[in-house]
Image (cartoon, grey):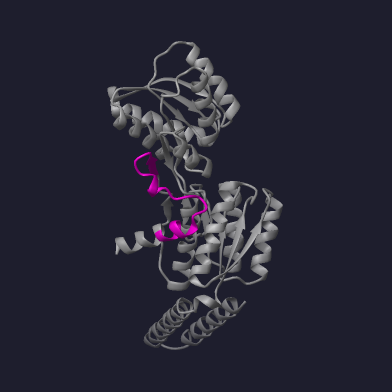
Amino acid sequence: MRKKMRMTALMMTAFMAASLTACGSKETAETEAKESSAAEKTEAASKAEGEAEKPAEDLTFGYIAYDMTDIWNEYSANSFEYAAKEAGVEAVVLDSKNSLEESITAMESLIQQEVDGISIFPISTEQGAQLVKMANEAGIPVTVENFAMDIEDPGDYIASVACEYDKIGYEAIKYIAEQKPGAKVFFCAGQEGAGVYEKYQEGVDKAVEELGDKIEIVATLHGDWLTDKAYNVTTDFISTGEEFDYIFANNGMMAQGCYQALKDAGMENIPIVSTGGSPDDYQMLQDGIESANMTAPVSVQGVQTFKNLYDSVAEGKTPEKFVSLPILPIGQDNLDDYIAWDDYEKAYEFVYSGEENAE
């Protein structure tokens, strides 16, 4: 409301100046216009400086989760809260429970509370754009996570942080080729037609094209993200007698099914590379079920999202418009580098030490 009143006052001043100079000379008009413009710039600069100097303990950030029963969203929200606590910022987390209506209600609530900034974890880019525009209308800075917001009219948001699944697929195949040049790979893929799987497939195809005879995908069967389905398709593939050296499983649940199928066939020596880096994945790495995992720590996503919002609101900085969630290949030889989804302290150190190294 205060922002609107100041803007209205500026507009009235400009209008009055224009009316007066219309009755005077051209030189007078130009002089007064310059003075008015300089005054506006000075006031805007003072306002921005005042906002940047607002103490962290006086800031309140809102966070809209799409569904806190989703483990990915839960850990991201928790890491956002951790980062806020470290900075002395109050965080208000609201759960939209996978409902568009609830997300709108949550945004209305945060606007009514006059929070200083809002982070959203939307259901889709379209829904994200709707929430962003609501924050825009209220004059509240907003940032986005889990989507790149690469749509025609996403609204005015500070930055977004998201996982690029094509890069994960690419890195997984590249990793296998480095471990065993010429490897024959069985790809236990996600659900056909799903956007996430299609992105994985783009990365796999790109890696195969670039690596040439250093890698070969001998079969691709869809485990649909499920342990039982992955077990069935892996068992079916093994029964064909096709030779293979590695399995690339699209997630940890499918990696479990692949391993059980290998074990039942007496082939548990075949290494499995998976993705995600969930707590279950880490356990499977420790147990030797997975030989490697292309981890994408969601705890880093939550911390980076907070940092984007804080840097803009509290420090007047302009973050990169899109930050890709880092892909950290973890194998038996570098387990200590693993960043757990619930290791908020390590994720915080990773994000902020990266900033220090950049400087």
Spot occupied by residue 296 in the image (x, y as percentages of width and height):
45, 45
Front-most of 15 and 181?
A: 181
Could you tell me which quadrant the C terminus lies in?
Answer: bottom left
Could you tell me which quadrant the N terminus lies in?
Answer: bottom right
Spot occupied by residue 145 in the image (x, y as percentages of width and height):
52, 53
Kindly indicate the quadrant of the structure image that contains residue 294.
Answer: top left
Front-most of 271 and 220?
A: 271
Q: Residue at x 29, y 32 (%)?
A: 178
Q: Which segment is the magenta one? A: 328-349
Front-most of 297 and 258?
A: 258
Q: Is residue 350 left or right of residue 19?
A: left
Number of labels in the image equals 0
Front-most of 159 and 170?
A: 170
Q: Residue at x 35, y 59 (%)?
A: 354
Q: Is residue 179 left or right of residue 241?
A: left
Spot occupied by residue 193 in the image (x, y as percentages of width and height):
55, 29
**Residue 60 magenta-drawn?**
no
Kindly indicate the quadrant of the structure image that contains residue 212.
Answer: top left
Up-down relation of residue 335 to residue 113 (above or below): above
Q: Residue at x 32, y 27 (%)?
A: 209
Spot occupied by residue 314 in the image (x, y as percentages of width and height):
47, 72
Up-down relation of residue 38 to residue 295 (above or below): below
Kindly indicate the quadrant of the structure image that contains residue 107.
Answer: bottom right
